[in-house]
Amino acid sequence: MDLQRIDYFFAVMEHRNLSLAAQALRVSQPTLSRQVQALEQEFETPLFVRHGRGVAPTEAARRLHEGLRGLERQFRSLRDEVSAASAEPTGEIAFGIPPSPRTLLAPDLIGRFCKMYPRVSVRVTEETSGELRDLVAAGVLDLAVTNIHEPMRGVTAEPLGTEPMLLVGPPRAIYGSTREVSIEKVAELPLILTTRPNSLRLTVESRLSQFGMRANVRVEANTLPLMTDLVLAGLGYTVLPSCGVRALIKEKKLSFRRISDFNITWLIAKPKSRSLSFAANRFCDLLHVIAQEKIAQRVWHSPRHAIAASAD
């Protein structure tokens, strides 16, 4: 099976219609139909069921699509690597980042990388740390920012920087002369947290449980903007990494206090079972450079210990 045939299969999976897929691929419909038939013969099973509005994938097609997603990226990475061995890096990088560090890292990182390597395209995915880890392990992403509280299944991880976790409330809601609050204070407040098994939720609950306490969860919300909107509306407090609310704090739209002895370390996750392309390695190097800049600016602190790899 070559890359062109994989492209044909992916197009039919996306459009669920041979005519529309052929138009997108700029080939004739009979050509596309022959390629689909060749795939079905190769795997000795029907991949699509025809109906009045197009085609529907069979269970075999869904499994093939899932398996090919990571392989297709590896094929393309290998092809790009070979063609760029003695030239400027080309190809695509697939990068993932969670909502909290997105505004702190993504614009600067991607802007600088695209300027340095204009022949490389960058595809960015925003998801939770756990989901991004799984996408890296599956080969869908080359690299992703995640955090130290996620199990590193199928990936290796390198530390970037550490920052405090904050208790965040509406403007002027958090008073006091000290710059920190205790974890006991957090347990007393109505909280707006993500749903399980999001790592930030589990991190907060784990920290509270160390002191024999439970989170008083009033509202569950799974997007950062929604969580801060609900805090602004006075519906409760939340606990977030400082990078996730930097802009709102700077604009004095939210009040905050550091939570004593409660930090988060951001990591860069790499695939465990395959090597990165030349372009992806350069992207990773630049991310480490930017992380060191954040440490020098005292936005982040240096991680307490390096994490070369994590066991499953």
Image: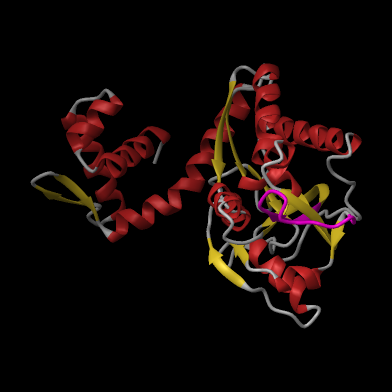
Quadrant of the drawing holding the C terminus = bottom right
- Can residue 142 be seen at all in this image of the molecule? yes
Residue at 80 percent across and 78 percent down: it is: 210
**Which quadrant is the N terminus positioned in?**
top left
Residue 283 image offset from top left, x and y in percent: 70, 32
Q: Position of residue 244 (x, y in %)?
A: 68, 46
Tell me if residue 265 comes above or below residue 90 in the rendering: below
Instruction: Identify the residue at horizontal 66%, vertical 34% (top origin).
Output: 106
Q: Is residue 15 left or right of residue 206?
A: left
Q: Quadrant of residue 167?
A: bottom right
Q: Position of residue 200 (x, y in %)?
A: 66, 61
The answer to whether residue 196 is visible is no
Figure disc tally: 0
Residue at 81% x, 79% y: name it: 211
9 versus 204 height, above or below: above
Q: Nearer the viewer, residue 271 or 158?
A: 158
Q: Position of residue 48 (x, y in %)?
A: 21, 51
Q: Which coloring applies here?
A: secondary structure
Q: Residue at x 66, y 36 (%)?
A: 103
- Based on the picture, tell me whether residue 83 belongs to the magenta stretch: no
Compared with 146, 31 (above or below) is: above
Q: Farthest residue in the left direction?
A: 52
SS assignment for the magenta stretch, majority: loop
Image: magenta residue range: 164-178
Q: Nearer the viewer, residue 113 or 256?
A: 256
